[in-house]
Image (cartoon, rainbow, N blue to C red):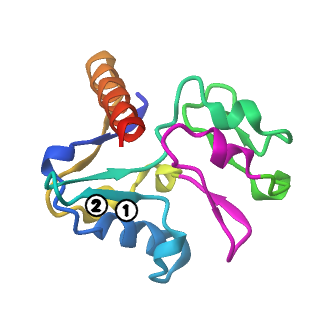
Amino acid sequence: MTKLLMIHPDKCTGCKNCSLACVFGHEGQFRPAGTRVHVYTWEREGFSVPMMCQQCDDASCMKVCPTGALHRPQGGDLVVYEKDKCIGCRMCTMACPFGNAVYDGATGAILKCDTCGGKPECVRMCPSGALEYIDDNISTRSRKKSFAAKFKAAIQEG
């Protein structure tokens, strides 16, 4: 069965361990600009939300990529990034409705979640359980879509 990253914003403390675990897992160093997990904090409202690529069913980033550097392999669930095919046009960064595809000037690559090959470091290092890597079924998918729609609306309002 396929799996997906489930975000529980009500459990997030804003510690950013997930961001640091992500970049360390991918690069072997603590370079915050190299993370694929972004923690958004609304201090006045008192909450934080970790965000990463949502692996959208109808992924805008894939649609606008002129070279196929962002694609979903046949039978796959993840949107895969291939740096050697990327021309650095950054259209994907503009197309992502959540801002989860980011251009990294230090490496010249697009940074987006790849679930760490099925063992997401962000989940492993989250002390509050705000992130889970769980089986993708109808109920988890509908919860995730509902959260994504609410988050998109909140971002557009503010």
User: As drawn, is 151 to the left or to the right of 43?
Assistant: right
Figure quadrant of the C terminus? top left
User: Which residues lie in the magenta part?
Assistant: 90-112
Looking at the image, which residue sits at the far top?
Answer: 138
Residue carrying label 1: 121
Residue 12: image location, x then y, percent: 18, 54
Residue 96 located within the stretch drawn in magenta: yes
Residue 119 located within the stretch drawn in magenta: no
Give the numbered dot on residue 65: none
Residue carrying label 2: 124
**Image quadrant where residue 154 sits:** top left
SS at mark 1 in the image:
helix
Classify 140 as above or below 39.
Answer: above
SS at mark 2 in the image:
helix
Give the residue drawn at x 52%, y 47%: 99
Give the residue drawn at x 26%, y 19%: 139
Cα–Cα span, label 1 and label 2? 5 Å
Figure quadrant of the N terminus? top left
Amino acid at circle 2: Arg
- Say few, some or many: other residues with alpha carbon within 10 Å of mark 2 (under 14 / 14 to 19 / 20 or more): some
- Say few, some or many: other residues with alpha carbon within 10 Å of mark 1 (under 14 / 14 to 19 / 20 or more): many
Disc 1, disc 2: CB below 8 Å? yes
